[in-house]
Amino acid sequence: MRRRPLAHHLATGLLTGVFALSTADAQKAKATAVPFSVAEASIPDLQKALASGRVTSRQIVEQYLVRIALYDRLLRATISVNPRALQDADLLDRERAQGKLRGPLHGIPIALKDNIHTKDWRTTGGALAFADLVPPYDATLTRNLREAGAIIMAKTQLTELANWSASTMPGNYTAVAGQGLNPYDARPDPRAGMDDGRPVMSTGGSSSGTGTAASLWPADVGTDTGGSVLNPSNFTMLVGIRPTTGRISRYGVIPITADQDTPGPMAKTVTDVAILFGALESATSDPNDPATTVCTPPPSRDYTKFLDPNALKGARIGIPRAFFYDTITVLGRRRGGLAAAQRAAMNDAIATLKAQGAVIVDPANIPSVVAEKTEDNLVDFPYCQTADQGRGQDADCSVVFKYGMKRDFNIWLTSLGNRAPVKTLTALREWNITHQRAGAIKYGQARLDISDEMDVRQDRERYEADRAKDLRLSRAQGLDAALATNRLDALLFPGNSGSDIAARSGYPSIALPFARVPVSASANNPFPAGFDPQPVPFGVQILTAQCADAKMIALAYAFEQATKRRVPPPAFP
């Protein structure tokens, strides 16, 4: 059931014949003066190479398979490889030769987080109970990608069940695949108490950006409930979009809670995520996901029209100084703030915005973050997520996640029909206990436990109150207030610090590569002598108002073009 040999053998098996090209392919290769390489290739690079006949989709897939075979043993970025990837590429090559192009991703490989349905091969969520699950239907976004011409290349590593399994589980660990590592320092942590295989450098949230960062594929689709597109993008020097909740259908995605779940694109450039975003969004609302009525797609769902290098000129950008940049004392506690290297990076980022003609509003603090009353303070209202926040111990935290998981996970299981390995969340917990010796719950299942004890009917009033408070503190007394009071186009957050408020509000946010900063270990648990941790990626986030995704992309593109700070991971050329 373990993924490491499976993904490697799948990739190696698919490579049969890679170095024995067909006669036509060999002739094309000889005619090409400079061989095309997929390493660091953007989607436009791939589009141009395919359109010119410089390379075929089969050759592109073969190159990515070689990279998976070379590097995935170190990174463990892949849970499974599409066993039909080469056949899919051949079909799309034939269609191209006939003058038929499905869409902007025709013949281009894309990876999916392994909680997104593909009906032709397995979707595991990283959970041992679902290790052999082949869903009876594609996710809406999977269907959209196929219609745009994409080759679904692989399923990426994730934190098991999108990190709603165990509160002590390291990021990017699953019972199916083991522990994923960050390509910017692909080593396990050697420190006492941390030496269980977890990475020395965080991979971010429950989506994996590692395969995209190391060019195992050009782009991937993650999912974000509390930061799991923005956070891994930040930690792997990628561009990642958490869109307005509802822009991209969640149908066919293993849920945590429909209140905050959203898929989102992850890639190396703003152009790439803009192209992928347009392919993921449906032309009309999805009847299987009511949230898709919230925003109207742009004409032709073409976000590349908003790639304006001058978009920052005259744009009003707010700096939420309190907590996110500067340490503050609220409700008797000191909170937040940046380390010196992080602060220097953000000063540099703000200077870039000014140089590009942006109007900087500093400070543009978020009222609910600095509120002096507990009932009005967002930071004082975390999610209930640990074993000691179960029923009767959850007065000071939001039950939205644990309630939503009980409600929406059981609905998802029902949608699988007779293919569901278990029928309820309760049955999953029981299965995990039965299969504990096989590695089902190495880190326990505290989050599943506190979710399952929720009663969807009896606890509905409490849930609705907490959801209303989440929205009040993240929107009306949060982002809406900061944006409107200061007449802002966007807010600029350091690193991944804006992920939580973006997720609760459901407003769009984009992560952008910018810097790398030194790692500082705890004085009580230093790194061993001679072990030098590599500097960790530290980017920026631009956050805008609900449905202002296009404006956000424009601002992000202008910032990217003025900076171009992404550095490929040097150990994976």
Image (cartoon, rainbow, N blue to C red):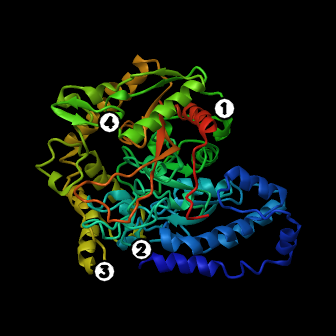
Q: Position of residue 258 (x, y in %)?
A: 38, 47
Whether tag 3 and tag 1 are in contact, CB under 8 A, the answer is no
In three-dimensional space, the C-alpha distance between marks 1 and 2, rounded to whole angstroms, equals 44 Å
Q: Going 26% across and 77% down the picture, which residue do you hit? A: 436
Q: Quadrant of the C terminus?
A: bottom right
Q: Nearer the viewer, mark 1 or mark 4?
A: 4
Give the amino acid at mark 3.
Answer: Ala
Callout 3 environment at 10 Å: few (<14), some (14 to 19), or many (20+)?
Answer: few
Mark with earlier residue (3, 4): 4
**Residue where numbered disc 1 is placed:** 308
Question: SS class of the residue under badge 3?
Answer: helix
As rendered, which of 23 and 531 lies closer to the eye? 531
Mark with earlier residue (3, 2): 2
Q: Nearer the viewer, mark 2 or mark 4?
A: 4
In three-dimensional space, the C-alpha distance between marks 2 and 4, rounded to whole angstroms, equals 42 Å
As rendered, which of 382 and 539 lies closer to the eye? 539
Question: SS class of the residue under badge 2?
Answer: loop
In three-dimensional space, the C-alpha distance between marks 3 and 4, rounded to whole angstroms, equals 43 Å
**Residue where numbered disc 2 is placed:** 131
Q: Position of residue 502 (x, y in %)?
A: 40, 38
Residue 507 seen in the figure? no
Check the image and report above or below for 307 versus 40.
Answer: above
Residue at the far front: name it.
Answer: 529
Q: Position of residue 357 (x, y in %)?
A: 59, 22
**Residue where numbered disc 3 is placed:** 438
Whether tag 3 and tag 2 are in contact, CB under 8 A, the answer is no
Q: Going 63% across and 48% down the picture, which residue do you hit? A: 272
